[in-house]
Amino acid sequence: MTSETQTAREPSTLPPFVDVIAHRGYSAGAPENTIIAFERAIDLGARSIELDIQWTRDNVPVVTHDPSLGRTIAGTGRIADLAWEELQECDAGSWFNAEFSDQRVPTFEQVLQNVQRLPGQLFLDLKPYCQWSDERVKLLLDLIDRYHWRDRSVACSFDPEIADRFNADILHPMAIGYSLTSAESFDELLPRAITAGAALVCAYDILLADPDLIWEAHAAGLEIVAWTVDQLEDMQRLSDFGIDRVITNRLLPKMATIEDPEPCASQPQSEAQNPTQ
């Protein structure tokens, strides 16, 4: 393909029929998984939001990605080894920009309280390196129900055993998703997803390499979601292939200059493109 042809085909606006999910909030313009990142995502037109959930030592569900402090949270140690009050002393915003030094790791309940105006869904990435006891599953579901989010939340995980526990209630099952990173894992999980009615949350590059995977999911009656798509051309191609939803760090509908949004500050490239693991 010539550069001239490539330029002519490059899109300048978001495809109209793709549900855009903000990855860890508006993580290209604010520190990921913080209240301000979620608020800005909503302001910029994100219909849905993806976020990460893990647990403190004293059984508080918190919204943060890494199992340990150091990258986005000042300090050292593992989230699972810290009490909630100890975690609240840690700066979760300065790594991105000094203006965000007041940001802290939010509890899942704080997020639920702050995203009430979100028009779409919450995609909850349940971290597989946490212990998911029956007590913790119940605590999370109780919070989801208290704020009336069960019908608008999707419990996703790279461990399908964790996701399955959130649709076990026959009378009021919760939508779930199986996250995956390869065509091989797609083939392995497809029969299980069909049985569970689970969405398939796929790394976008495997879908671009083999668009038939999108067709296979749809033929099985399943929704398919691509992560993490930060180039308009990739989003347009996935839209042409029939993708249902796209998780993105930066391509939100109300971006003032969507062709050239602000860079992800000091966020490492590997983390900016590595989605929900």
Image (spheres, grey):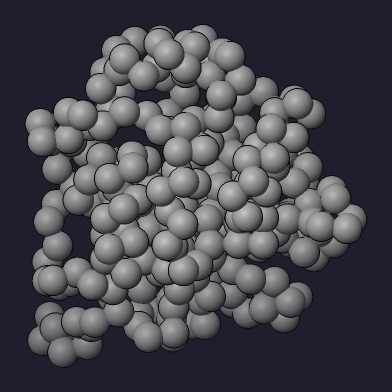
Residue 234: image x %, image y %?
34, 72
Residue 260 quadrant: bottom left
Q: Is residue 119 left or right of residue 124?
A: left
Q: Nearer the viewer, residue 248 or 108?
A: 108
Which of the two residues, 145 or 132, is positioned nearer the viewer here? Answer: 145
Is residue 15 something one can see in this rendering? yes
31 horizontally vs 218: left or right: left
Which residue extends farthest right? 170
Residue at the spot x=51%, y=76% of the render? 243
Quarter of the image containing the N terminus? bottom left
Image x and y of residue 56, in percent: 53, 19
Q: Residue at the spot x=70%, y=59% of the render?
A: 175
> What is the x, y in percent for residue 196?
81, 59
Position of residue 10 relative to residue 187, above or below, is below
Using the rendered view, name the quadrant where residue 131 is placed: top right
Number of numbered labels in the structure image: 0
Q: Residue at x 26, y 55 (%)?
A: 40
For the point 78% across and 42% down, which residue is it? Answer: 165
Residue 269 in view: no
Say which of 147 and 55 sits in front. Answer: 147
Lateral position of residue 140 relative to residue 112, left or right: right
Where residue 207 appears, as percent x and y from the top left, is 50, 67
- Is 219 drawn above or below residue 263 in the view shown? below
